[in-house]
Image (tube, rainbow, N blue to C red):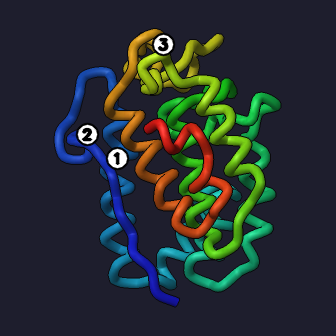
Amino acid sequence: GEGVIINVSSGGAARAHRANAAYDATKGGIESLTRVMAIDLAAAAAFMTTHARLLDRRRFAVRFEGADPSGALTALDAYRNPDGGYGALEPDLRAPESQPVGAMHAFEVFEDIAPATSPRAVELCDWLDSTSLPDGGLPFALPIADATGTAPFWAHADPKASSLHITTAVAAIAHRVARHDPAVAGHAWLARV
């Protein structure tokens, strides 16, 4: 199959930051993996089999091997909370509580499965609607009970302040899902952002 890989990384891939060795090494590794994948999809598949979490292996199989989307959706459900949001999907934010960045990553899966749809996408819009602040924006991160495995910029985010960064990131991927999912396209939350 064909596909496009978009790598969103940070300066941590190219320069070291005090007390952030694991973060910087991970970002550098992701950028190297992206370059290898562009050259050799078989090597990328082998890497995914050996190192990726189940969700990412299932997404890879949908995108590049024509697998049924149900495997990716089942793996995604492991990160879903009863409130309709998603936690622990962001590598730098392993807390189980539902987070806006978890919504972004869940929408990435809903985009990967196109043209299939999932009712979970609308439920996620419901959660985002309930989480949005009065100005319509999303906080960069919501409070977490245990910051273990969480980068400081997530742990110390102000949950009462809208973040243009996370709001636009979540809204952008939701709009991409809306191109093939009429229920998401018609949701009140998406109309507001």
**SS at mark 2 in the image:** helix
Residue 164 % position (x, y): 32, 30
Q: Would residue 49 be seen by someone viewing this image from the given angle? A: no
Asked if marks 2 and 3 touch (Cβ < 8 Å), the reply is: no
Q: Which residue is mark 2?
A: 12
- When the figure is inspected, residue 112 is found, relative to residue 187, above or below; the finding is below
Identify the residue shown where x is 45% and y is 44%: 171
Q: Nearer the viewer, residue 28 or 169?
A: 169
Identify the residue shown where x is 68% and y is 36%: 126
Q: Which residue is mark 1?
A: 27
**Circle nearer the N terminus (3, 1):** 1
Q: Would residue 178 be seen by someone viewing this image from the given angle? A: yes
Q: Quadrant of residue 127?
A: top right
**Circle nearer the N terminus (2, 3):** 2
Asked if marks 1 and 2 touch (Cβ < 8 Å), the reply is: yes
Q: Amino acid at mark 1?
A: Lys
For marks 2 and 3, give the CA distance: 25 Å
Where does the C terminus fall, quadrant-wise? top left
**Circle nearer the N terminus (1, 2):** 2
For marks 3 and 1, give the CA distance: 26 Å
Q: Which residue is mark 3?
A: 159
Q: Nearer the viewer, residue 191 or 108?
A: 191
